């Protein structure tokens, strides 16, 4: 392994300053899961690793007046066990219980996960249906907020700039009566990435019509995306089998798919349709709405 | 006299492995040891125009840089020596070794490798085995005439043929002509990786004359012979030391790089280590052959198989070096329709060169391919005949005194008994649950798999030590299969002493008596037989030297003074037999297959290590399940696109459904106390059982491995075979 300088800043300002100083020769390290994998696979190695482990408060998980706040250094295992996460919405917990293996969940962090922008990862679709917002610190001391549905731009690419650091993930309060679910289709090995993943949230109004619909699809293409066409088709409708099935069919062609070892383009599209319908059906069924 | 079965089992090496005390080749750190790194070909097929190593030589920490020019014309191989230690004029696969650097650290070695410049002239690559035999196909080995072959190599009709073999008995064409019905099917299997977690690793030390090699090779004496040939020195000048091996699954009987590392040790007079990067093991190692099989079977009006023909094409990859058989076909490669008695059979198998990774030995070489094809074929025949697949098998299996498809006579056949036990244990007479499918498969493997010679012979030294312990000296290393615990238990039992009084000493090729090593299921029946014979002889000598005393007292009396050689020759022609019944659920909308229940009945003779035996069988099930459902070394333009364990998924515990193992009682094998081989059974026929169950559940047939959800989905959508 070639050498690099290892930095352990103790404040966000110091961390972003280091990132700014070394530019593309620096990389921020949270749990290090993605980073060590990249190191091992032998690509270009940065000269500076900025370890975030000493930054205070960044592993915090709390509920406040604006909803749920998730610290970027919180591990998947911590989030999976967090009463605040479960209390916010039971379906949110599924984002973290589904990830890989217990070893990865104990080491990997939410911030690292989002920054690595892995299309098949579990948290993004679930966080997307809950309208999560990524809070980012910049070297000039300012911060900006990015809606998670605008955060990913391509394969392992996000809008995050080199000197920017994720400092928190805000999940706004969930309106009462919102039912949500996460469906993960993984016909290969249990600890493989899914072939397709679908998160769906529905809320019906007093007349039983769908007032709010959120559908996000992961794994089939370069990045996790909101299925806006499906959502639009649902709003104002009664959640009948026919409506859900018809809306889910829009997931087949509305999303860019890529062929890989987990499936061809046509198969992934079909599975996006099937699993969107299944997720919507679960979300529309009160008994199964956990 | 045997209380073996009732004695609790403790794995001899278990504590050391669990506590991390056990040292593997990657753990050793010699004073002044260098690390090696290879420059590998980025092209599947090319001529080497020039190699410039000047810049690499002057890099910091570099002690030696070797290219093919330094070693030519040295090639290696178990039977046919067709793999250059380092390519000098031509590369034949992505990952082929072109140059090697020894440096103070791996980082130094890697940095130097990056500075080596090679000019290639690209050649058209042969990537599909069917293309290899085209009249105008590029020839991979134009110099094959000068290759060394142990024995006399037959002529082949095409230069891209590695090996070709035909077995024929009876009057095949006439039998087909009189068959009531003839059935024909075609099957394809992906290339799969052995999945040993420890990569091939070696350390070579030399003082300029002798060589000491610490290696992950499980056949140390064979490696010694091959290395002596490569280095051009007497075998006695080489010591091969195979200690703990971190997983094998058939992949550790073959060394690819130990020879070159010996040249590096010679060039530097320093110890040199090479640990194969994992992705290189997967891109350019010795995986299981991808295979294409066509089968034809003729049936008479009593539903008896009267004629069978198989045509098999093995993708041998760039080199045949990994195959040990004289015909350069994987070991079980001609043995189709295992377990059936068919009077007229023709099997034609060919292995061909392609510009992809070489095929080698993997757990039961050749058998999973033939089993998937045969047991799917039989099931399809039953469906077309509209009779129960179990019944069709039962009608056609070998009974005592019958013959198998290689024409060998089975004095005893336990297949009918195994099938009857399966029927009972799996409740085959009870209707399956609605919505589920049930599939059956059978199989057999010679126990052990050799048919004569060193395969079936073993020798160990049994001694009484100064501290009155009984010590067994063997060349057999324990690669995880539990070899040493078997030997300990057999010897303790024979002498009637506690297992704690028996030590197993694994010796290098300079200390232990000759042994062919681990493989082909020979350790328990053959080496175990030698240990038992040695213990029996020791008991006789003890009685002669100190008559009338308890064994314990005898050992104290003769402490340090007695040593005998235990020898054993196993009789050929015995078989371990087995059968699976599995139940699956298939999601019709997605094609996903879920194995909900599995029963495995086996005849493995007497269990010497019941816990380890169970582990072998359940482990084999998991091993075969992964290869049945998702494992696939996918190759695109010569590149293995799944060359790491991120992308090539091995089954985890979460993937393995509960397997119920039922052992056939009262069976007697040829090993100690009637033990038989058990390591290469449960992985072989699980894939066909699943394919058969899928067909039963949803009416479509998948004729290729792995049986992915997408293939089932496509078959359901189109009704076509996939």
Image (cartoon, coloured by chain):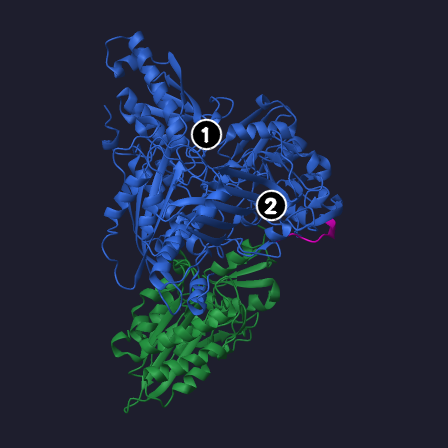
Relative side of A246 to A166, left or right? left
Residue plotted at (28% across, 76% down): A289
The chain identifier of the residue carrying mark 1 reads B
Give me the disc on residue B352.
2
Q: Is residue A234 magenta?
A: no
Residue B289 appears in the rendering: no
Image height of B608 relative to B549, above or below: below
Q: Colour of chain B?
A: blue
Relative side of B166 to B444, left or right? right
Q: Which chain is drawn using green?
A: A
First in sequence: mark 1 vs mark 2: 2
For the view shown, which residue lies furthest in the front direction?
A: B178
Magenta-drawn segment: B117-127
Q: Specify few, some or many for label 1: CA neighbours under 10 Å numbering under 14, 14-19, or 20 or more.
A: some
- Tally of numbered discs: 2
Picture quarter with the C terminus of chain A? bottom left
**Residue B427 image offset from top left, x and y in percent:** 24, 51
Between residues B443 and B18, which one lies in front from this camera angle? Answer: B443
**Residue B543 image offset from top left, x and y in percent:** 29, 10
Give me the disc on residue B451.
1
Image height of B113 relative to B216, above or below: below
Image height of B434 relative to A134, above or below: above
Between residues A58 and B52, which one lies in front from this camera angle? Answer: B52
Image height of B413 relative to A141, above or below: above
């Amino acid at each position: 392994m070639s050498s690099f300088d290892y930095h352990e800043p103790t404040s966000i300002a110091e961390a972003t300053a280091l990132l700014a100083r070394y530019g593309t020769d620096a990389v921020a390290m949270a749990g290090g899961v993605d980073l060590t994998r990249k190191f091992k696979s032998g690509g270009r190695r940065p000269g500076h690793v900025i370890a975030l482990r000493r930054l205070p408060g960044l592993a915090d998980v709390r509920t406040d007046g604006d909803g749920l706040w998730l610290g970027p250094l919180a591990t998947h295992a911590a989030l999976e066990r967090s009463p605040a996460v479960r209390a916010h919405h039971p379906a949110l917990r599924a984002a973290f219980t589904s990830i890989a293996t217990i070893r990865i969940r104990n080491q990997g962090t939410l911030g690292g996960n989002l920054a690595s922008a892995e299309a098949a990862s579990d948290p993004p679709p679930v966080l997307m249906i809950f309208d999560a917002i990524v809070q980012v610190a910049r070297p000039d001391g300012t911060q900006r907020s990015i809606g998670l549905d605008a955060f990913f731009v391509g394969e392992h690419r996000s809008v995050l700039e080199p000197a920017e650091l994720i400092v928190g993930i805000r999940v706004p309060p969930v309106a009462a009566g919102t039912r949500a679910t996460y469906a993960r289709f993984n016909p290969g090995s249990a600890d493989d990435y899914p072939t397709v993943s679908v998160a769906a949230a529905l809320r019906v109004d007093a007349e039983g019509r769908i007032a709010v619909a959120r559908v996000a699809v992961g794994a089939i293409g370069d990045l996790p995306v909101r299925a806006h066409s499906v959502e639009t088709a649902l709003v104002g409708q009664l959640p009948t089998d026919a409506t859900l099935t018809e809306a889910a069919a829009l997931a087949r062609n509305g999303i860019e798919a890529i062929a890989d070892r987990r499936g061809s383009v046509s198969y992934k599209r079909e599975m996006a349709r099937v699993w969107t319908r299944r997720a919507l059906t679960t979300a529309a069924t009160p008994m199964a709405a956990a | 006299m045997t209380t073996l079965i009732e004695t609790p089992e403790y794995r001899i090496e278990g504590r050391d492995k669990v506590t991390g005390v056990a040292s593997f080749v990657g753990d050793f750190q010699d004073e002044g040891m260098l690390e090696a790194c290879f420059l590998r070909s980025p092209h599947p097929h090319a001529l080497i125009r020039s190699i410039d190593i000047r810049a690499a030589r002057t890099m910091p920490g570099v002690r030696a840089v070797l290219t093919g020019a330094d070693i030519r014309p040295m090639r290696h191989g178990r039977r046919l020596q067709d793999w250059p230690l380092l390519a000098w004029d031509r590369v034949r696969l992505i990952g082929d070794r072109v140059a090697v650097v020894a440096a103070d650290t791996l980082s130094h070695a890697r940095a130097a490798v990056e500075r080596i410049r090679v000019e290639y002239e690209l050649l058209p690559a042969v990537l599909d085995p069917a293309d290899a035999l085209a009249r105008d196909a590029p020839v991979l080995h134009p110099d094959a005439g000068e290759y060394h072959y142990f024995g006399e190599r037959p002529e082949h009709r095409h230069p891209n043929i590695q090996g070709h073999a035909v077995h024929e008995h009876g009057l095949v064409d006439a039998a087909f002509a009189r068959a009531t019905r003839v059935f024909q099917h075609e099957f394809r299997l992906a290339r799969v990786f052995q999945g040993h977690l420890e990569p091939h690793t070696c350390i070579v030390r030399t003082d300029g004359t002798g060589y000491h090699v610490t290696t992950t090779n499980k056949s140390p004496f064979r490696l010694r012979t091959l290395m002596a040939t490569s280095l051009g020195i007497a075998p006695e000048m080489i010591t091969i030391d195979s200690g703990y091996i971190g997983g094998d699954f058939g992949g550790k009987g073959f060394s690819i790089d130990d020879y070159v590392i010996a040249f590096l040790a010679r060039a530097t007079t320093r110890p040199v280590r090479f640990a194969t990067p994992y992705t290189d093991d997967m891109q350019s190692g010795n995986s299981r052959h991808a295979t294409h099989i066509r089968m034809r079977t003729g049936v008479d009006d009593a539903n008896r198989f009267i004629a069978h023909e198989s045509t098999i094409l093995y993708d041998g990859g760039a080199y045949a070096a990994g195959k040990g058989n004289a015909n350069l076909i994987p070991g079980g490669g001609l043995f189709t329709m295992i377990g059936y008695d068919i009077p007229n059979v023709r099997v034609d198998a060919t292995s061909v060169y392609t510009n992809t990774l070489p095929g080698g030995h993997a757990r039961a070489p050749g058998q999973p391919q033939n089993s998937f094809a045969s047991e799917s074929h039989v099931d399809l025949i039953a469906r077309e005949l509209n009779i129960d697949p179990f019944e069709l098998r039962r009608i056609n299996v070998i009974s005592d005194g019958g013959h198998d498809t290689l024409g060998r006579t089975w004095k005893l056949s336990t297949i009918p008994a195994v099938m009857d036990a399966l029927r009972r244990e799996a409740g085959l007479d009870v209707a399956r649950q609605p919505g589920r499918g049930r599939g059956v498969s059978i199989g057999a493997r010679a126990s052990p798999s050799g048919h004569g010679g060193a395969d079936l012979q073993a020798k160990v030294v049994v001694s009484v030590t100064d501290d009155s312990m009984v010590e067994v000296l063997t060349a057999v290393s324990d690669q995880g299969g539990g070899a040493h615990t078997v030997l300990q238990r057999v010897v303790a039992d024979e002498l009637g002493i506690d297992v704690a009084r028996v030590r197993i000493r694994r010796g290098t090729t300079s200390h232990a008596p000759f042994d062919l090593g681990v493989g082909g299921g020979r350790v328990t029946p053959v080496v175990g037989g030698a240990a038992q014979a040695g213990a029996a002889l020791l008991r006789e000598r003890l009685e002669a030297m100190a008559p009338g005393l308890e064994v314990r007292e005898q050992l104290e009396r003769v402490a340090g003074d007695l040593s005998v050689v235990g020898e054993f020759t196993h009789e050929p022609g015995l078989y371990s037999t087995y059968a699976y019944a599995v139940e699956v659920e298939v999601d019709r909308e997605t094609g996903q297959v879920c194995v909900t229940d599995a029963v495995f009945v086996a005849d493995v003779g007497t269990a010497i290590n019941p816990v380890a035996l169970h582990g072998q069988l359940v482990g084999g099930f998991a091993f075969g399940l992964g290869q049945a459902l998702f494992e696939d070394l996918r190759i695109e333009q010569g590149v293995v696109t799944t060359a790491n364990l991120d992308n090539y998924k091995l089954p985890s515990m979460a993937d393995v459904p509960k397997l119920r193992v039922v052992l056939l009682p009262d069976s007697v094998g040829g090993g100690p106390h009637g033990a038989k081989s058990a390591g290469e059974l449960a992985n072989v026929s699980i894939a066909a059982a699943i394919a058969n169950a899928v067909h039963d559940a949803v009416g479509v047939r998948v004729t290729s491995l792995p049986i992915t959800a997408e293939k089932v989905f496509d078959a359901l959508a189109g009704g076509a075979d996939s």
